[in-house]
Amino acid sequence: MGYAIYCRISRDSAGGGDGVSNQQQECQKYADQHSLVVDHVYTDNDVSAFSGTTRPEFQRMLNNLDAGKHDGIITWHVDRLYRRTVELERIVNLVEKTGIEVRTLRAGNLDLNTANGRMAARMGAIIANFEVDHQIERMMLSQQSRAVEGRFRGGFVPYGYKVGNSPGSLVIIPEQAAIVREMARRILDSEPVISISKDLNRRGIPTQNGKQWRTSTVRRTLMKPSVAGLSVHHGKIVGTAQWEPIIEEEDWRAVVAILSDPARRTQQGNVKRWQGAGVYRCGKCGGTMITKKSRAKYGSGRNYLCGKCAGVSRNLDKVDDVVDSVILGYLDMPRNQLRVANREETEGEDLGKLMEERRHLDERRSRLGTLFASGAIDEDQLVVGTRDLKQRIDKLNGRISEVRKVSPMVDLVLAGDELQQRWRDMSPDIRGEVIDELVTVTILPTKSRSVFDRESVRVEWK
Ligand SMILES: [Zn+2]
């Protein structure tokens, strides 16, 4: 048996003198000097200590240590090993359980077997947390100054553009810009978003990521201030960008006004009045449903009718009731909410991650209280820590509500107890979009025309 060397490269060490190969050499030298046998080197390559990415080799090392395969760890500095108090606690537990040794080249040996040693290590981890916070602050500040100067600040390149040669510049891609203008014009002509996304897919036009258009992609593409040549920071327009607009600002504002109204009740033009029209399918021929007045007195007195073969027709309100109960039942469950949040890629903003991060910050905030209660930190540290965390949680909430504005589905996921109400308040048009993103609804032919059979409405998850 021998020691495990653990190396980790992170953004803050890039360019510094402690790249992975350097870390490894130094650790090996240390081992030789202290006559320690090294039997494995674990290396993780994450971008930032805060990125939250799991470090696979770190996990593997802990498992092997737990299984008694090594005598201890040699690492360059404790900050290679852990940045978060949770990670430290795992190591503390391991030391208590197996009596392994943790040797660091830059911070001495961590004596995690004594209360004093653990306290020192914990303080170190708390300070490291603050350091990461400040790195993020610095990054945000530099992003903000770039945004104010109207330069592209990196991240997701908006559809219609590519990154230009000079730093912070964007250049129009003519073919994509034409699509953006077309989409905007169609929205201004009151065309439902769903028919635009379907049409683009039918024409074989890919999104920025080479994927199929979804209603949410259409919305997001059009709602980006960058397409109107505006520079944004934290969801706020901070100035004129240095790149060419694709749509005039005035037109863009009109498009945004239409798209951000969740209850687009306007009944003019082509805006849909029934959620299943153009969305539900015919079980006989696969065509899509239109609606038609019927003799039935129930609800709106309309039927869904196959627009292609006219061979299948069903009471409109009863079909909608079935579909609504499936959709709302699904969205009401937390597990599904997270699933939806995760699959809703929102340019540059990953909602699942945002929610996860907020949960993590909330946890940290409550942990600060515990540390204070146990005397591990003093009042000043508690006050500063709580204030910093609160600022970051506020910022996160702001970003989450931005995402919510763009995606009706996310809005539903976050509606909580108001789910039913939100659903009812949405226009049929937008309900149709949500239904179409989640499920395929097929109305099957039946023998009896007089009795409504719930089973004849087939709802399949996409
Ligand atoms: Zn049909």
Image: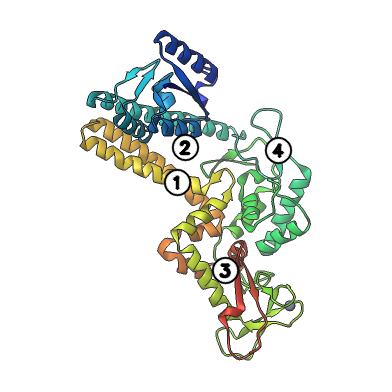
Split into quadrants, the picture shows ligand 1 in the one at bottom right
- Dot 2: element: loop
**Nearest to N terminus: mark 1 or mark 4:** 4
Q: In percent of the image, x 34 and y 32: which residue is there?
A: 94
Q: In percent of the image, x 64 and y 31: which residue is there?
A: 168
Left or right of 17, for residue 181: right
- At label 4, which amino acid type do we have? Lys
In the displayed image of the protein, which residue is found farthest to the front?
1
- At label 1, which amino acid type do we have? Glu
Left or right of 222, for residue 388: left
CB within 8 Å, label 1 to label 2: yes
CB within 8 Å, label 2 to label 4: no
- At label 3, which amino acid type do we have? Ser
Q: Residue 451, position in %: x, y?
A: 58, 89
Q: Which residue is mark 1?
A: 356
- Dot 4: element: strand
In the rendered image, the quadrant that contains the N terminus is top left
Seen in the picture, residue 312 relative to 97 is either above or below; the reply is below
**Nearest to N terminus: mark 2 or mark 4:** 2
Q: CA distance from mark 1 to mark 4?
A: 31 Å
Q: Which residue is mark 2?
A: 52
- Dot 1: element: helix
Q: Which mark is residue 162?
A: 4
The reply to whether the residue tagged 1 has its Cβ within 8 angstroms of ligand 1 is: no
Seen in the picture, residue 456 relative to 149 is either above or below; the reply is below
